[in-house]
Amino acid sequence: MNIEDYRNYCLSLGEDIEEKLPFQKFKNGEGVLVFYVMGHMFSFFDCNDFSVISLKCQPERIDDLKAQYDCIGNPYNESPKHWIGINPNTAPDNLLQELTRNSYEIVKVKYASKRWQKNTKTTKDSSSHLDE
């Protein structure tokens, strides 16, 4: 998959996707494009070297994916416990899309849950204040 098709795929995952170049002040980070959901990264790559896309992944899947696919290895500059790196030039498009959607869902579910818990706590605090 080429860089523009991948970008379009990421943006198609939901209305809540943002893309940014957040590392422009860093020598080797100026071309890193990051995709966010709920303000948190789910995919990023260097636009100047489109050979590794870093994606969130369930820790229990990582070893099996690496063993099964030559295109999957370690992520760029992230923990290999929770992230994978995938070569978009050699990965089958359907695999890249599945793992990108998976990454998006991991992040969205995690932070939607945290937001819900925070809102629930705030609502409980407000209603307990009304009881006084």
Image (spheres, helix red, strand yellow):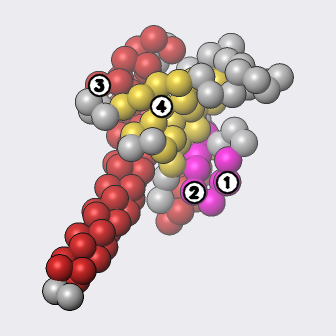
Label 2 with label 1: CB-CB less than 8 Å: yes
Tell me, yes or no, whether the highlighted magenta stretch contains residue 66.
no
The type of residue carrying mark 1 is Ser
Residue at 62% over, 28% down: 22
Give the main secondary structure, helix, strand or loop, of the magenta stretch: loop
Give the secondary structure at mark 3.
helix
Task: Give how far across and how far down residue 61 sits, in percent.
Answer: 48, 59
Residue holding disc 3 = 12
Mark 4 surroundings within 10 Å by alpha-carbon count, few (fewer than 14), some (14 through 19), many (20 or more): many
For residue 25, what is the image quadrant? top right
Based on the displayed image, in which of its 4 quarters is residue 81 positioned? bottom right
Q: On the image, numbered disc 1 is attached to which residue?
A: 79
Q: Earlier in the sequence, mark 4 or mark 3?
A: 3
Residue 131 % position (x, y)? 16, 86
The residue at the point 34 percent across, 66 percent down is 118
Residue at numbered disc 2: 82
